[in-house]
Amino acid sequence: MEILHVSAECYPIAKVGGLADVVGALPKYQTQAGCVAKVVMPAYKTRFFATHEFELVHQGGTWLGHDWYHVNVWKEDHNTLGFDLYLLDIPGLLDKEGVYGHWNDTERFLAFQVGVLDWLNEWVHHPDVIHCHDHHTGLIPFMVSYGYKYERLRNIATVLTIHNAQYQGQFGWEQLYRLPGFDLWKAGLLGWEGAINPLAAAVKCAWRFTTVSPSYLEELYTNANGLESLLSSERSKGVGILNGIDTVVWDPATDPMLPVNYNELTFLKAKEEIKQQLCEEFGLDPSLPLISFIGRLVGEKGGDLLPEIIGRSIFEQHKQLNFLVLGSGDSHVEWSLQQTKIYTGKNFNVQFGYNEGLAHRIYAGSDFLLMPSRVEPCGLNQMYALRYGTIPIVRSTGGLKDTVVDFGDPGGFGIRFIQPAAWDACSAIARAMVLYHNNSLFQEIREYCMQLDHSWDSAAEEYLKLYNSL
Ligand SMILES: Nc1ncnc2c1ncn2[C@@H]1O[C@H](COP(=O)(O)OP(=O)(O)O[C@H]2O[C@H](CO)[C@@H](O)[C@H](O)[C@H]2O)[C@@H](O)[C@H]1O
């Protein structure tokens, strides 16, 4: 079984969020399970590309409407990631710093997808499955099925994984001319609500679509940013497969980003030490419980709720707890966190921006990790927290519902709340404070959390079953 993953992100080459973590790990586990799993992604201007050795395996070019682009495909030489990695380079278009947010993102990702298929067209043996991730690769299933020049690829099964249906990559019909020639009678398959919608096109044209947790699949039928009816009508193709985590990268016993390593036998002292350093760095009192948030400061993640949750909890708990936030996102959320910092004094600090090393230290040095998400397709942070002996406080939604059991329930180990509102998050935090002060239970639960198995093994098997069914 040979699988080609096509993605805009892959850790450690280019990471914006959880998509990168998944694409950097799943193929490794699939390879270990006996498949040939490969990844192709854009050759952005990254440190990884500059510091690793690559071999040029394809040179070509493609028209995108009236514009001609050169396309090079580079293969990483030393199997550094545990699977074959290909970077597709389009000079002048993809070779920029940063993954998203360029003025011509539509053109960039369209060129990437066309480049991938042109390259694939030249392979002697084709993969069995093209596995597309999110809307940046969503036009591939359509082009494979109906593009005139991709006749040779017709029999390759296409699978789409929806990591986040909020983002769909829509663009206007006036750009239709940029797509390589196809049977125009099929153009309707590209559209949704008056625009070309790559995510919708992939849901319609892929042989199967998956979501990153079973609960998220159910939620999408009623809440999918406009795609509810489409997803419902394509329900028979949908499968929910819970993400895992890369337990080699995310292992407190070996994590090189931590000042002290630890396991479930030694975590007490080590976590205390890391917390001490973290609190010193951010001017917080290490003798108080530390609740952290890591992620994009957007409504989906409940970022806008944070200022009220933090202010209110500090007041309700008589300043006997600390908060630390790492993230960036909506400017009004960042602004109101700045304001919150002014009146919460030494109980709260925030670092804006992206910092992988700091994120690892926060997972390790915190007592609790807060995730007040409105929408959470899977969520990886709660699984990282668990592995690092940090108790997640999560809103019951999507993958959070599938991975965190409240400690009040049989076999429970986390804290859950229901409403996407500050008052409910604050009640959960109040419960967390009671748990924190019950030393033996707190220690017992943390030890238990660290032993939970969230590795990719079972998910990799489920994907394999799905591919085999095709
Ligand atoms: N400021 C910062 N500094 C350092 N690291 C940061 C950071 N902000 C975020 N991260 C890291 O980025 C990752 C975010 O993972 P999420 O699961 O929250 O992903 P995201 O919402 O981007 O992706 C979508 O895809 C993933 C994967 O399928 C789903 O789990 C998720 O629900 C869905 O929304 C974690 O590794 C986290 O540590």
Image: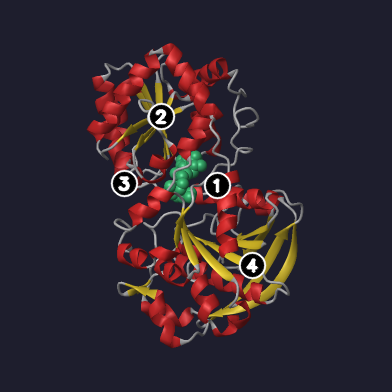
**Residue named by callout 3:** 299
Label 2's element?
Answer: loop
Labels 1 and 3 touching (C-beta < 8 A): no
Sequence-wise, the earlier of marks 4 and 3 is 4
Q: Is residue 179 above or below residue 250?
A: below
Judge by depth and name the residue closer to the eye, 452 or 319: 452
Mark 1 or 4, which is nearer the eye? 4
Q: Amino acid at mark 3?
A: Gly
Q: Report the side of 241 relative to 347 (left or right).
A: right
The answer to whether mark 2 and mark 1 are in CB contact below 8 A is: no
Give how far apart the Cα atoms at labels 4 and 3 are: 38 Å
User: The C terminus appears in which quarter of the rendering?
Assistant: bottom right
Q: Which mark is residue 228?
A: none
Q: CA distance from mark 2 to mark 1?
A: 23 Å
Three-letter residue code for mark 4:
Asp
Say which label, 1 or 3, has the lower sequence index: 1
Instruction: State the quadrant of the N terminus.
Output: bottom right
Q: What amino acid is labelled 2 in the image? A: Gly
Report which residue position mark 2 lands on: 414
* Residue under the point 55% across and 76% down: 144
Does dot 1 land on a helix, a strand or a loop? helix
